[in-house]
Amino acid sequence: MHYDHELAVARDAARQAGQLIMRAYAELVAIPDAPDWISTPTDRDAQELILSVLRNAFPDDALCAEENTPTLATARRQGQRVWVVDPIDGTRGFARKLGEFSVMIGFIDAGRVQVGVVLEPAINRLTYARRGGGCWYVQDGSAPIPCRTNRTDKPQLATLVQSHAKSGQPTPVVRAVHPARVLQTYSSGIKLAMVARGEADVYVNDYRAFKDWDVCAGCILVEEAGGVVSDMAGQPIRYQQADYTQRHGLLATATPELHAATLALIARAGI
């Protein structure tokens, strides 16, 4: 299967959700001290729109998503074909009005991610991939541009992207990897898309627990652009586990050589 129809529907659902989100964003009063766990009515409205589009197109598919919304409540949660949705990844960046948030829609068939779409509504940039079809991005309605990861093979030459450091000091990951450059943004979707487009070389998610929807759509972008994704033990990312929780971290890199070297460094540091 080529999953062209699934990709087209996912792109359309993301586009519609992005329009809804930006209408709300225009009226939003910024919340400078928005906490990590914040959720907004816009998260739920966007998710309901996305799931409705997906269900109309694929009524027999299972749905997995972050927010408790009516469509999700009546959907199957497990199955061979599963849609994995984060309506606003990086809600903190949305609530603070920093523009650092994304819409993430991933599609899994038989345990493997086949389609991924990451939309950055604030800058109207869509990065997407289909298994075997490469990774592409569209900016402001431009013709699709192919994505390729950089050929960086050494951590000390790499650009590492991470979430905003709370202390202002180098994070444990930065101390372990010693990259040439560090970029910071909210949203795992944005970080993974940056690696896919060659704007960063390394992304390490060292959270003790995060969810399938935090990474599903973004991982295939990196893989289809020529990069490597694994957990922090070097094993493939597995989805649809208990509570949809990832407990072994995530490492996305531009090249196999950089992946192996970074795995060794974070293991040596006990991360």
Image (cartoon, rainbow, N blue to C red):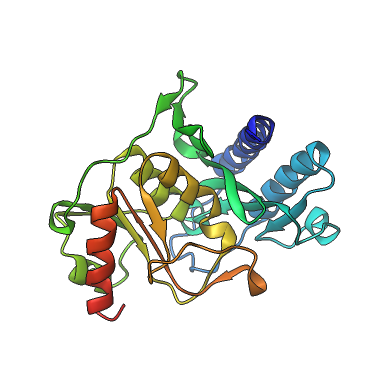
| Residue 237 position (above or below residue 84) | below
**Quick one: 153 or 247, which is closer to the camera?**
153
Q: Position of residue 35 (x, y in %)?
A: 49, 68
How many numbered marks does the figure carry?
0
| Residue 1 position (above or below residue 82) | above
Quadrant where the N terminus lies? top right
- At horizontal 51% and vertical 56% (from top left) the residue drawn is 215
Please identify the residue farthest to the bottom as the structure is shown: 270
Please identify the residue farthest to the front as the structure is shown: 1
- At horizontal 54% and vertical 39% (from top left) the residue drawn is 131
Q: Position of residue 267 (x, y in %)?
A: 28, 76
**Quick one: 203 or 25, which is closer to the camera?**
203
Quadrant where the C terminus lies? bottom left
Decide if residue 87 is in sight here: no
Would you say 12 lies left or right of 134 here? right
Q: Position of residue 42 (x, y in %)?
A: 65, 50
Q: Give residue 162's quadrant in the image.
A: bottom left
| Residue 184 position (above or below residue 269) | above
**Quick one: 118 or 79, which is closer to the camera?**
79
Q: Give residue 226's quadrant in the image.
A: top left
Q: Position of residue 238 (x, y in %)?
A: 55, 64
| Residue 16 position (above or below residue 95) | above
- At horizontal 26% and vertical 41% (from top left) the residue drawn is 150
Decide if residue 213 is in sight here: yes
